[in-house]
Image: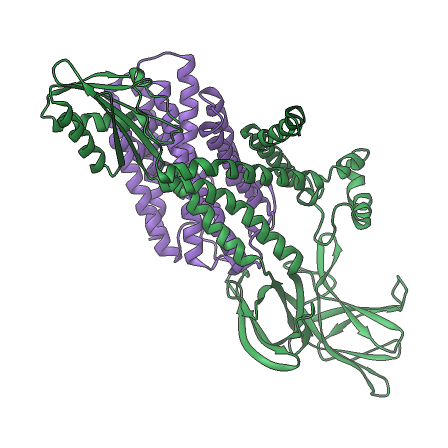
Chain colours: A green, B purple
């Protein structure tokens, strides 16, 4: 391959490397992510289960968004602004940022390694003429060198010296390990994304796993697990808000009881990597339905998980299946936290529908313990009850997320609280003793001028005041 | 003890207000600064005792509603401002911290101080205390950096010997972010841990979580721009102001958007 061909390959690679390691790219991408995140706060976002780019998403846009946004619906919907965090623009910005982080970390690794090993000593006086701190001392060269060494060591600098042309050069650094903090904190962001993706693709989450007292349900997702609710209790503060609610549960694995526990908010149950969270609760109704001949149709507790919205009244709603009857019933409890003019406490509304119909064939109000005949069946509202709502989660990536968080905090703390310091000094024979120049080099995240001044003052003090600081300029700092 | 807590809060507010007025006067006459410097720690001590009393009464740290968090926020601004005055002896920092904390205390005074019982999700006192304490320190530090940015821009326009050099203000603003940024990171991490225990997911793009993430990104951008991008001066000051606007947006977020953090 000749040099022209080589340059044709190398030039684009070099450009790509420069592009992906550019701080400007990072700042632009951060700005894009900031803007999109703010959009997600102010614009309505799709509910759980509806994802950008699907038919459900389009249907949701038509039903929910178009009445308010009109002609803007298509444009805003196309850019995914109603499902920002799954939109290609947000994901694309995220990928660009990750690539930028990865490339920067790789590029910076060389400098980090050099800092860990120790930067080579510069043995030329060039650059020291503009040093911000210059001292003249009556001490001899060797005594000055000793003073500088002692001061640097006292401040826990890793110090190396070299002689050249009768001058002594110092390179001193401190907290070199904190250079690793940049790599650690940046790579932790990549680990965070990996952990999140692992959980998203290999895990599952069910946020509305509902049980009524005495019932059991399969967890599903090939876990072989089932959860049964033994008892549920809720305590309330005097103002009516929930103080605590707990579910006493049994976990079954392949039909065998394997665990019993109490699940409360902030006290989830863990079994085989699967976590059961006490998420919410609500009213339920224990119902008995039989034919007029006394044959039981159903005897169950119905969770009233839905809401019948008849402004201003919001009434809990549940579905009562009536197998082999061709009918379905809907149960309606009194409005929550307000006076209900139709349903009193301890009453339940019931609407009977023929299967497939949208209009009820009959409705009534049930009192506790009082059977009522409707559509050839006898309905009895036995007693009010509660349902318990769980969130069940399996996340194989969560351990990686916690590790990443720990590394992120550690890396940031290292970089910011223990900033890498690199001081260089030159001592040369002077007219009446020796001269000393101090400067800092490299990127500085610390108060360079204060540090140089502190070191200079200490050198002056241990030379018994025989040194004078003749120049204290400004060292441009970070 | 609840009445004592409320009384001490009111006294702290009044003394903070007096200190802020004295700071204003001291712009024209430096000899008044010592009175302001004397009033500031008095206000801080009164606020601290008020917080302690309130914690004893409620049985948890003063972090469970906007009234309590506002007082804690003001406390955070005062302690960071006092810390910078103590280390740097730049009295302008103390003055700005006093003024900022006064603004937050006035806002707190408009809120109901009634104790609201904790909903079950908030009954995790260790995480509640750690998470919100980290936020208080972060917000306090960012408040100081915001004040320094404003002062920097003013100093650039008006050359006055009464104020420190612009470079000093710029430096203090940066050092405040160095304090605040890791604490903001810790706030988000502790929040994620708590969300995982309480809600079953460590991150859900809840509006408050998203606003905190935006704030974190802005300050991360500031640090990168300063340390790696060669940004200096006015651009950085503007970025600090934008960052603190994000802090305020997150702080007031419960009034702007719904979400799991609103606990309504």
Given the current orientation, which residue lies at the most extreme front position? Answer: A2
Residue A177 is left or right of residue A339, and the answer is left
| Image height of A437 relative to B12, above or below | above
- For the image, the number of numbered tags is 0
Residue B156 is left or right of residue A267, and the answer is left
- Tell me the quarter of the picture where residue B11 sits: top left
- The foreground one among A401 and A276 is A401
- The foreground one among A167 and B58 is A167
Residue A308 in picture, x, y percent from top left: 75, 59
Given the current orientation, which residue lies at the most extreme top position? Answer: B159
| Image height of B15 relative to A472, above or below | below
In the rendered view of the protein, which quadrant contains the C terminus of chain A? top left
In the rendered view of the protein, which quadrant contains the N terminus of chain A? top right
Given the current orientation, which residue lies at the most extreme left position? Answer: A464
- The foreground one among A215 and B264 is A215
Q: What's the residue at 72%, 47% (across, down)?
A: A46
Residue A63 is left or right of residue B90, and the answer is right
- Tell me the quarter of the picture where residue A414 sits: top left
Q: Is residue B74 visible?
A: no
Q: What's the residue at 66%, 62% (across, down)?
A: A206
Q: Is residue A186 visible?
A: yes
Residue A254 in picture, x, y percent from top left: 66, 79
Residue A463 in picture, x, y percent from top left: 11, 26
| Image height of B137 relative to A326, above or below | above
Residue B22 is left or right of residue B231, and the answer is left
């Amino acid at each position: 391959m000749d040099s022209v061909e080589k340059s044709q390959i190398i030039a684009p690679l070099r450009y790509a490397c420069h592009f992906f390691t550019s701080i400007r790219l990072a700042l632009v991408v951060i700005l894009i992510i900031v803007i999109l995140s703010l959009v997600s706060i102010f614009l309505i976002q799709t509910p759980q289960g509806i994802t950008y780019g699907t038919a459900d998403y389009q249907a949701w846009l038509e039903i929910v968004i178009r009445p308010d946004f009109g002609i803007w619906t298509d444009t805003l919907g196309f850019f995914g602004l109603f499902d920002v965090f799954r939109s290609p623009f947000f994901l694309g910005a995220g990928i660009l940022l990750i690539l930028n982080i990865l490339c920067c970390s790789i590029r910076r690794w060389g400098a980090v390694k050099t800092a860990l090993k120790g930067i080579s000593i510069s043995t030329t006086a060039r650059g020291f003429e503009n040093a911000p701190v210059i001292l003249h001392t009556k001490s001899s060269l060797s005594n000055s060198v000793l003073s500088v060494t002692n001061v640097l060591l006292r401040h826990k600098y890793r110090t190396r010296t070299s002689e050249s042309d009768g001058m002594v050069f110092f390179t001193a650094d401190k907290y070199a390990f904190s250079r690793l903090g940049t790599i650690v904190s940046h790579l932790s962001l990549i680990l965070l994304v990996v952990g999140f993706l692992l959980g998203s693709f290999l895990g599952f989450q069910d946020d509305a796993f509902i049980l009524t007292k005495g019932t059991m349900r399969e967890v599903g997702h090939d876990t072989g697990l089932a959860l049964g609710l033994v008892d549920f209790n809720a305590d309330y503060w005097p103002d009516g808000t929930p103080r605590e609610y707990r579910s006493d549960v049994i976990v079954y694995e392949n039909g065998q009881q394997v665990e019993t526990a109490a699940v409360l908010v902030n006290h989830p149950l863990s079994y085989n990597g699967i976590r059961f969270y006490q998420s919410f609760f609500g009213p339920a109704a224990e119902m008995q339905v039989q034919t007029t001949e006394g044959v039981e149709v159903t005897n169950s507790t119905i969770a009233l998980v839905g809401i019948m919205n008849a402004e201003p009244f919001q009434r809990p709603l549940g579905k009562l299946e009536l197998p082999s009857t061709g009918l379905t019933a809907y149960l309606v409890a009194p409005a929550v936290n307000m006076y209900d003019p139709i349903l009193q406490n301890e009453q339940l509304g019931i609407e009977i529908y023929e299967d497939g119909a949208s209009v009820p064939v009959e409705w009534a109000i049930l009192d506790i313990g009082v059977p009522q005949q409707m559509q050839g069946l006898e309905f009895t509202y036995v007693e009010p009850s509660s349902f318990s709502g769980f969130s069940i989660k399996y996340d194989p990536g969560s351990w990686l997320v916690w590790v990443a968080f720990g590394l992120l905090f550690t890396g940031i703390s290292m970089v910011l609280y223990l900033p890498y310091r690199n001081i260089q000094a030159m001592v040369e024979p002077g007219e009446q003793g020796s001269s000393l120049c101090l400067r800092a080099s490299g990127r500085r995240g610390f108060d360079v001028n204060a540090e140089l001044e502190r070191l200079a003052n200490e050198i002056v003090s241990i030379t018994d005041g025989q040194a004078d600081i003749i120049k204290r300029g400004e060292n441009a700092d970070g | 003890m609840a009445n004592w807590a409320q009384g001490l809060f009111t006294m702290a507010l009044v003394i903070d207000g007096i200190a802020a007025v004295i700071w204003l006067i001291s712009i024209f006459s430096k000899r008044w600064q010592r009175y302001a410097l004397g009033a500031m720690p008095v206000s801080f001590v009164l606020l601290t005792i008020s917080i302690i009393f309130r914690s004893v009464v409620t049985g948890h740290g003063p972090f469970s509603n906007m009234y309590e968090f506002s007082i804690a926020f003001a406390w955070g601004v005062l302690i960071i401002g006092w810390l910078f005055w103590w280390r740097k002896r730049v009295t302008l920092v103390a003055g700005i911290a006093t003024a900022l904390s006064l603004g937050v205390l006035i806002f707190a005074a408009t809120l109901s101080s009634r104790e609201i019982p904790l909903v079950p999700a908030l009954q995790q006192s260790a995480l509640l205390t750690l998470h919100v304490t980290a936020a208080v320190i972060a917000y306090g530090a960012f408040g100081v950096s915001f004040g320094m940015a404003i002062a920097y821009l003013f100093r650039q326009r008006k050359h006055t010997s009464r104020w420190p050099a612009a470079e000093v203000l710029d430096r203090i603003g940066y050092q405040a972010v160095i304090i605040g940024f890791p604490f903001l990171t810790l706030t988000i991490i502790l929040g994620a841990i708590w969300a995982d225990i309480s809600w079953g997911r460590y991150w859900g793009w809840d509006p408050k979580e998203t606003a905190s993430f935006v704030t974190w990104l802005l300050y991360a951008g500031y640090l990168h721009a300063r340390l790696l991008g060669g940004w200096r001066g006015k651009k950085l000051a503007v970025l600090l102001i934008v960052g603190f606007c994000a802090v305020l947006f997150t702080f007031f977020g419960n009034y702007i958007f719904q979400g799991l953090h609103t606990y309504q």
